[in-house]
Image (cartoon, helix red, strand yellow):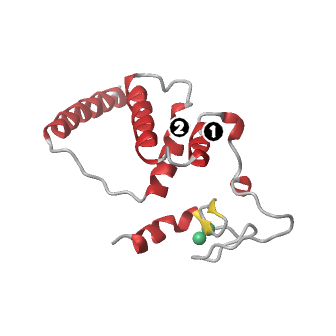
Amino acid sequence: MKNQIDEQDFQKAISEAIIQLIRQPPITLVLQRPFLLILISHLQLALRHPANNGCCSESVRQFIDAMTDEFFTWSPALLELICRGDDPHYDVLNMEIVAQPEGAQRTCRVCGCTDREPCKPACAWIAPDLCSACLPAVSRILRP
Ligand SMILES: [Zn+2]
Ligand SMILES: [Zn+2]
């Protein structure tokens, strides 16, 4: 019974907080474009959850489409990549994301991690010589 009351309080607190959020001004975000791509891929994964089919998921789908139209249509490869994000067939393990020549050892140019010794928590290759753990660091360096 106690848990039920706590849950009701929690739901009420959320409603009140969301009403406050609506009254607050919009936020302007500044993102590096590679991070936007990563964000889209994670949203696509969340959208594939079978129970994720409410009106919020439709808004997220529209956000993905709008961002894709605005920033990625210049690259057929990126369009294909985003397309594959909706297809579970292309879900891959970290090691398989960037193809490499047989026997070659990839090394991150920032942290020096490798296929055999990835970062903790585990990273993925977002370019042949850059791992996902280092993207925030690179983004900071690139920021004017
Ligand atoms: Zn790295
Ligand atoms: Zn790494």
- Residue plotted at (60% across, 68% down): 130
**According to the image, label 2 marks what residue?**
44
Viewer-proximal residue among 22 and 104: 104
**Relative side of 76 to 135, left or right:** right
What residue is shown with label 1? Answer: 84
Are dots 1 and 2 in contact, CB under 8 Å?
no
Tell me the crowding category of disc 1: few under 14, some 14 to 19, or many 20 or more residues within 10 angstroms, Cα based: some
Residue 120 falls in which quadrant of the image?
A: bottom right
At 56% from the left edge and 24% from the top edge, which residue is drawn?
A: 50
How crowded pointer 2 is (Cα within 10 Å; few <14, some 14-19, many 20+) is rated as many
| SS class, disc 2 | helix
Disc 1 residue: CB within 8 Å of ligand 2: no
Q: How many marks?
A: 2
Vertical placement of residue 140 versus 1, above or below: below
Three-letter residue code for mark 1? Arg
Which mark sits nearer the N-terminus, 1 or 2? 2
Residue 138 coordinates in the image, percent (x, y): 48, 70
Quadrant containing the C terminus is: bottom left
